[in-house]
Amino acid sequence: MDVLGNGQWKTFKTVQVLPGEAVQVSFDPQEKGEWIRVKTAQKTIASAHFTYAQQEKRGEKPDDIFQGLATSGNFNGALLYGLGNNRRAFGSTRVMRTCGMMGEVVGMAAYVAKTHQTNPRDVYEKYLSEFMGMIRD
């Protein structure tokens, strides 16, 4: 890891990853670095994925701009609606990762709806806390 971004590298952690396995390495908040380098001990083909997240600061109530994103404006059975009631909601974020995450969240919403034997709109209106808890876990 290059803590200051000045070319001075130090070993942060050494991890053994066997063929076909994956390892998650977490950073503590006090561990800071400008650059991270992954090195192998021998010739290999590997992938490294980095995820950065801050402490969740959002509340339980979603912003109104998201109202209708996972339901249709006039049909209680729909789960995925690309633009929502606010037509600009997903206008600039049509990328594969966003759609993949929407699919994951819609699956969770379908689970909550089926568990409570209700329609998708009721997940938002009646079971939002339970649903948000699943997303955060």
Image (spheres, helix red, strand yellow):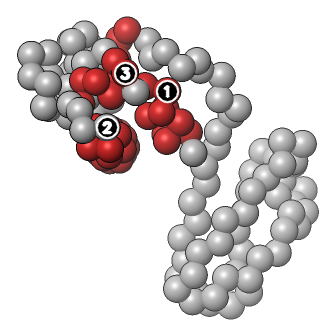
Q: In this view, does 24 lie above or below 28?
A: below
Q: Name the residue under label 2.
A: 116
Tell me which corner region of the image, top left, top right, bottom left or bottom right, holds residue 113: top left
If the image is split into quadrants, where does the C terminus sit?
Answer: top right
Using the image, tell me which numbered label, if any, was put on residue 30: none
First in sequence, mark 3 or 2: give its number: 2
State left or right for residue 107 relative to residue 127. left
- Residue in front for this viewpoint, 136 or 14: 136
Distance from disc 3 to disc 1, alpha carbons, whole Å, reads 8 Å
The local secondary structure at tag 3 comes to: helix
Mark 2 residue type:
His
Of the pair 91 and 128, the residue shown nearer to us: 128
Residue at position x 33%, y 28% from top? Answer: 123
* Proximity of marks 3 and 2: CB atoms separated by less than 8 Å: yes
Compared across the picture, whether 39 is left or right of 96 comes to right
Amino acid carrying label 1: it is Ser
Neighbours of disc 2 within 10 Å: few (<14), some (14-19), many (20+):
few
Coordinates of residue 134 in the picture (x, y in percent): 49, 41
**From mark 3 to mark 2, how far is it between C-alphas?**
10 Å
Label tally: 3
Q: Is residue 26 visible?
A: yes
Q: What element carries label 1?
A: helix
Q: Are marks 3 and 1 in contact (CB under 8 Å)?
A: no
On the image, which quarter does residue 114 sit in? top left
Residue 126 disc label: 3
Q: Nearer the viewer, residue 69 or 9?
A: 69
